[in-house]
Image (cartoon, rainbow, N blue to C red):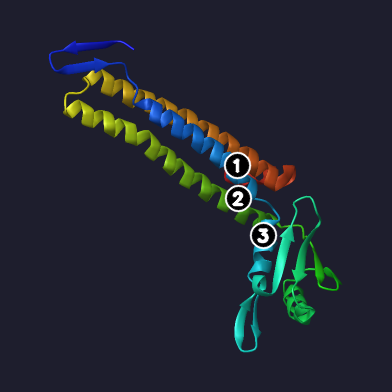
Amino acid sequence: MLNLCWGWRVIKEENYSIQAKNLLEFLIQDYSESLKSFHQDNFYLHEIKKFRFNINNRIRKLLDISEVKNNFKDKFYHIIVFNTEYNELIKTELDLIPLSYKEKGQNIYVDKKTLTFNQLMRIIDDIEGFKNKTLTKCSKAKLEPILRAKNALENDFIDQVISRETSNRCQELYESTEKEILKITEKKIKFVLGLENYERYLKEKV
């Protein structure tokens, strides 16, 4: 790296943006991995986990009296009840949704239900919200090196050229990251909705 000294002032190649580059790359990877948790199954799985029961004058959650398992590849949710005495309580709540199920001892297999377009859009809203939070993090990742360079400029550690290069480079990195996140998001939305609902989504989005 070339360093030029002018009295007590040092001018060097721009390297503040490396911080933004590394963090933005991490945020893209983390976002892509986190999106895997957004799935059609989550809608009714969330409804099931909200079950509450009055047992011996105490309010108990479903997860207090059972374990709920879900594999995206299966066509059912698996509820393992710790005590079969609670089966009827759980089945009553399932009937209210309603969801069909099969009971085998302490195991209750709940059939997964096809979601309506509006129900799917609630998942899409969650994805959009998560996307916006991630883009906010990206914006902060872009801004921090710019502020560091600005502070360095004010203290005469770098010159205006380096500060401007930092700002421009960080903006380029942000725009590239934003484009990638939007691309990943759209792909996920298409996967969650399915082709027919995705086409409807695009028409209503216009």
Mark toward the viewer: 3 or 1: 1
Locate residue 86 relative to residue 175 in the image: left or right. Answer: right
Q: In the picture, which quadrant includes the N terminus?
A: top left
Residue on which the image places disc 2: 124
Mark 3 Cα shell of 10 Å, populated few (<14), some (14-19), many (≥20): some
Q: Marks 2 and 1, how far apart in space?
A: 17 Å
Mark toward the viewer: 3 or 2: 3
Asked which secondary structure carries label 2, the reply is helix
Three-letter residue code for mark 2 = Ile
In depth, the one of 68 and 43 nearer the eye is 68
Count of numbered labels shown in the rendering: 3
The disc, 3 or 2, on the residue closer to the chain's N-terminal end is 3
Asked which secondary structure carries label 3, the reply is helix
> For residue 75, what is the image quadrant?
bottom right
The residue most toward the bottom is: 57
In depth, the one of 107 and 178 nearer the eye is 107
Residue on which the image places disc 1: 33
Residue 11 location in percent, x, y? 23, 16
Residue 101 location in percent, x, y? 82, 68
Mark 1 Cα shell of 10 Å, populated few (<14), some (14-19), many (≥20): few
Residue on which the image places disc 3: 43
